[in-house]
Image (spheres, coloured by chain):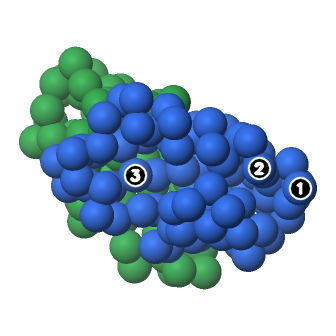
Chain colours: A blue, B green
Amino acid sequence: MATFMDVHHGMNGITADQLAAAHQADLAVESAEGVHFKQAWADPDSGTVYCLSEAPSKEAVQRVHERAGHAADEIHAVPLSV
Amino acid sequence: MATFMDVHHGMNGITADQLAAAHQADLAVESAEGVHFKQAWADPDSGTVYCLSEAPSKEAVQRVHERAGHAADEIHAVPLSV
């Protein structure tokens, strides 16, 4: 398992309810891929959403996001943290 | 106070020690700006570092990073989180 930060662009105007619903959609399908989405942060002005996950691979992160209806624009392994 | 996610590019090859030292440099000067850097994640392969902070403004976040010797390339307020 590794830690990943993924980024979605173009989510301008996203609301708290929409962010919560998107996160729930990830949680609903993540177990099939061995992924867990831990946290997410959104900037409605720039339309940027950051998601932090634990997953076996970048591809597994993307498969969960795709199944939940919102593929990520960037996915980075973040092996270092403080 | 608000929550911010900032991003540094070009940090290819960053090590755990370098990330820890950079974070400590932020912590050492943050109080003058009323900022607190909470967490940071790094991808040495793509050279991307994400920093999560609580701060009074985007400008205060950047002033701390500048004083610590590593200005951010992007700073986004992230008023929504899950």
Q: Can you say whether A48 is above or below B47 in the image? A: above
Label 2's element?
helix
Q: Which x, y percent locates residue A82?
A: 60, 43
Distance Cα–Cα, label 2 vs label 1: 6 Å
Q: Amino acid at mark 1?
A: Ala
Q: Nearer the viewer, mark 3 or mark 1?
A: 1
Same-chain check, marks 3 and 1:
yes
Locate residue A8: give its quadrant: bottom left
User: Which numbered disc flags the more N-terminal residue, 3 or 1?
Assistant: 1
Locate residue A39: give its quadrant: top right
User: Which numbered disc flags the more N-terminal residue, 2 or 3?
Assistant: 2
Seen at 36% across and 43% down, the residue is: A42
Label 1's element?
helix
Residue A29, disc: 2
Q: Which x, y percent locates residue A18?
A: 40, 38
Seen at 52% across and 44% down, the residue is: A22
Can you identify the residue that label 3 sits on?
A49
Residue B68, disc: none
Q: Residues within 10 Å of mark 1 (few under 14, many from 20)?
A: few
| Front one among A81 and A47 | A47
Q: Amino acid at mark 3?
A: Val
Can you identify the residue that label 1 sits on?
A32
Q: Which x, y percent locates residue A36?
A: 76, 46
Report if the CB atoms under discs 2 and 1 are less than 8 Å apart. Answer: yes
Label 3's element?
strand
Distance Cα–Cα, label 2 vs label 3: 19 Å
Q: Nearer the viewer, mark 2 or mark 3?
A: 2
